[in-house]
Amino acid sequence: MSYINNVRMFVRVYELGSMSAAARDMNVSPAVASSRIGELEKHLGIRLYNRTTRSIQPTEQGSIFYPGALKILEAMDEAEAAVHEVTNTPRGSIYVSAPLGVGRRLIAPLIPAFHEAYPEVHVRLRLSDRTLDITGEGLDLAFILGQLPNSEMRLKNIADCRRVLCASPSYLAARGTPETGQDLLKQKHACLLLQFPGSSESRWTMTTENGAQSFDVTGPYASDDGDVLVNWALDHRGIVNAPLFDVVDHLIAGRLVAVCQQTPPVDVHLASLFPHKRYQDPKIRLFLEFIGERLKAYLDERSELLALSLKDRS
C-alpha cells in the first residue's frame, strides 16, 4: 500500500497546493508527506514538484501524471468499495464540503454519530460559503443551500428550507415593521447582506401575490458569514434574511421578530451535489442516507417547534 499512499499524497498536494496542508489533511507530519513525494519521484524517475521555501508547484511531468494518478486512486477505491460492500464493512475517507452555517449547525453535529455507526469511515469536512470546484478540489460531495444549479453532476435534494426575514424588537421599534418587500425599500431599512464573490444577496427574492419577485435591497453592513449577520441583527443593526434553522431559537425566545410576512422569502433547497460515479461507492451512499434522513427530520422538528411557540403566543 505504500505506493498507493504515495500517490494519494501526491494528489492531495496537487489539489491543495501545499505540502503542509496535504499533510494535515492526511494526518501525517510534513516530513512524512515530503518523504512520500520523494519516494514516488524516485520510483517514477522524474521530479513531480518544484519546491522552494515558500511554494510548491507541479512540474510539467507532475501535471501530466495527475490525471493518471486520479484514475489509479479511483480504480483502487472502486475495487475496495466493491469488496467492502460484500463484507458490509465500508471504510476509507469521504471529503465533504458545506456552507458555513449548514456545516456548523447541521452537518458537523451528525458526523460523530455517523462515525460511531461506521468507525472505518473517516469524514473530512470543509466549510466555505464560496462555490467550490468539487472535482478540482478533490471532494466526494458538497452540500449546497440555495437554488439548485444546472450541473452535470448528480444532485440529491434533501429538503426545502424555509427562510425568514427578521430583526430585533428594538430595531423595529425605532425603524418600523415592514410588512412587504416593497416596505423594505420605502422605509429604507438597513438590510444585512451576505456577500462574497458570485453571491446575489443584494437581491432578496420574495413570494408576492404576483409570484416570486426580487427586491434590490441595501444596507451598511455586509459579510460573507451568515452568523455575523445574525449577530448584527441581534445587536439591533438591521434585518437579516436567514434560513429558519439559523434563527429559530432567537424567534422562539423573542430576541428576533419575523417581518415581511405578507411577502415571505422564497424557500431554498438543501441538497447534495457529487460526481455520478461516487454514488457507486457504498460509503458515499451510506453517508448521504444517514445525513439526509436526520437533516430532514431535524428541519421538520424545528419548523413545528416554531409553529407551536407562535400558536401559544396568539
Image (cartoon, rainbow, N blue to C red):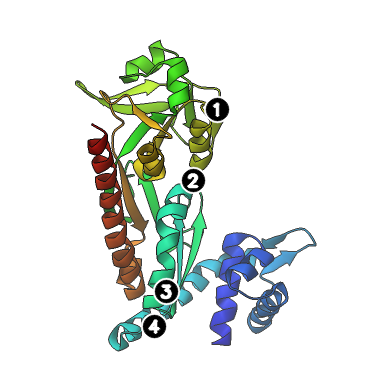
Identify the amino acid type marked 1.
Answer: Tyr
Residue indicated by mark 4: 80
Mark 2: which secondary structure?
loop
Q: Residues within 10 Å of mark 1 (few under 14, many from 20)?
A: some
Task: Give the number of the disc on residue 115.
Answer: 3
- Observer-side mark, 4 or 2, equals 2
> Which of the two discs, 1 and 2, labels the residue nearer the N terminus?
2
> Which of the two discs, 1 and 4, labels the residue nearer the N terminus?
4
Residue indicated by mark 2: 129
Q: Residue at x 41, y 44 (%)?
A: 246
Q: Are the residues flagged by discs 3 and 2 in contact, CB closer than 8 Å?
A: no
- Observer-side mark, 3 or 4, equals 3
Residue 308, position in %: x, y?
A: 24, 42
Q: Is residue 110 left or right of residue 66?
A: left
Identify the amino acid type marked 4.
Answer: Glu
- Cα distance, mark 3 to mark 4? 19 Å
Task: Give the number of the disc on residue 221.
Answer: 1
- Cα distance, mark 1 to mark 2? 17 Å
Q: Residues within 10 Å of mark 2 (few under 14, many from 20)?
A: many
